[in-house]
Each structure stands twice: as structure tokens, then as C-alpha cells.
Amino acid sequence: MKISIIRHAEPDYENNTLTANGFIEADLLGKFLKDEKIDYIYSSPLPRAYFTADAIVKYNKTKTYKVLDFLHEFEPFMWDRDIPYLESDTRLYDKDRFLEVDFMNNPKLVKSYEFVKKEFLSLLEKHGYKKNGVCFDVLKSNHDHLVFVCHFGLESHLLSHLLNIPVNALLNHTCAAPSSVTTVYTEEREEGRALFRMQSFGSYAHLTVNGKTPSFMARFDEVFGDGNEPFVLEL
């Protein structure tokens, strides 16, 4: 099975949509995926995500998409923390213990985390792969291609369950640009058992082949004081 996780195109948070540049990014992505074999498309319920999904469906004409509530951007906002906080407790980089740490250990965050985990792993099980330890039991081998159109925070959570990487490492040490595509495949190294392996992260080939620079949104200054606008998320 192949999974593509797509971050929505450049967002206009204030107006709950995409920017003009974001609609161009989404259109280029849709054209880029025009001939891609896609079996299922799942989208976040937020407009910036389903407008991006619309562009995929526009060109990949035999497909539609299903909106799933758990693909909503993760709440509460738990990333882009300052460096002293990230260095304050090694459990932040433990995939099983990060929820024990101050700030992370609050009922709303724990509830959100468990909801996303339960719904995502349940969906994968319906598609033939059941999480069992660090790998997955193969209930039904297949070559289906699942596309998830969502958000960077949510993408990090999905990848943490697929790849067994602490979510805080993904949230604070990776950055998927708007409209970028992350690709993960199953590998069945033995009969009945599979692991997921990431082939590419945050690809924006659909932009570069058209001479477009990826959006800076979701990044901080490369050098302190460079003057780029800070990233502020408003759900």
C-alpha cells in the first residue's frame, strides 16, 4: 500500500481559505497528480484542505474525496515551542512518554492525541494493515494508494504512528511546505507482517518544475532576525 500525505496549499488563515498563491499551488499539484493512480482520497474538514483536495479531484477526474473529522489540524497547538522548553525534558523526545511532560499533559491535548491515533489506525486496519507493536499485521495485502490532504501538525502525528518517530521530533525538526507531498509505502519483509517506509518527505516537485518557489509558511527565520514574518496559526 502507498500513502501520500499532502499538506494543504498556502493558507489565508484570516479568511479561512487559501491565498491567491495557494490556489495556484493547488492547481499545479492537481495537474502534477493527473495521471497518478489514486484509490482513496481523504480530506480534513477545514477549507484550506478541501480546496486543495478539490484541485486534485479536478484533474484526477475519476476520483472524489471523503472528509474525515480526525484530519482537522491538531488541537491544541503544541509545536513551534521555544528552545528552552524543548531542552527541558528528554521525555519530549520519547514517543510513548511525551504526554507526561508539563503543557503536553492536559486533558484536551491527550484527548485529541488519542482520537487521532484511534481513528487513523482504525482506518488503516480497514484498508488491510493493523498496527501491532512497531510494525503492522497484514490483514489484506494490496497496492492501494491512499491520499490524505491535511495539515502539517496532523501530518506529523500520522507519520509518528507509521514510522515510530516521536511526534515532537517531527513537529519541531521537519517542515512540510504548503502543498508538499510525503510518500510512504508498506514493505512486507515477511509474510503477514509489514512496516511503513518513507520514500520522500515534503516533496514540492510540482512547484519546482513550474519555476515556483515553495511558500515559507511554517518556517522560522533561517538566521535569527532575517525579517521573515513569524508563523502564526489561527484555527
Image: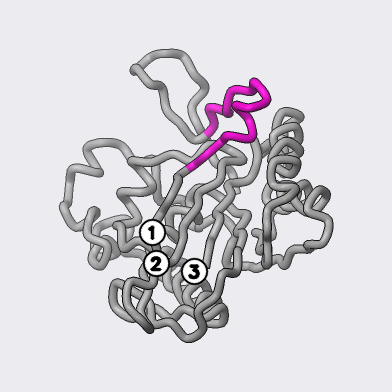
Label 2: few (<14), some or many (≥20) within 10 Å?
A: some
Give yes or no for contact between labels 2 and 1 (Cβ–Cβ under 8 Å): yes
Task: State yes or no: residue 170 in magenta.
Answer: no
Q: Which mark is residue 187?
A: 2
Residue range (magenta): 202-217
Residue that mark 1 sits on? 197
Circle 3: residue type: Val
Circle 1: residue type: Arg
Q: Position of residue 66 (x, y in %)?
A: 72, 67
Query: In this picture, is 131 found above or below 205?
Result: below
In this rendering, would 4 be left or right of 187? right
Task: State yes or no: residue 211 in magenta.
Answer: yes
Residue at 55% x, 75% y: name it: 142
Dot 2 or dot 3, earlier in sequence: 3
Dot 3 or dot 1, earlier in sequence: 3
Mark 2 or 1: in front is 2
Quote the CA–CA distance across marks 2 and 3. 24 Å
In this rendering, would 55 be left or right of 134? right
**185 or 173, which lies in front?**
185
**34 or 30, which lies in front?**
34
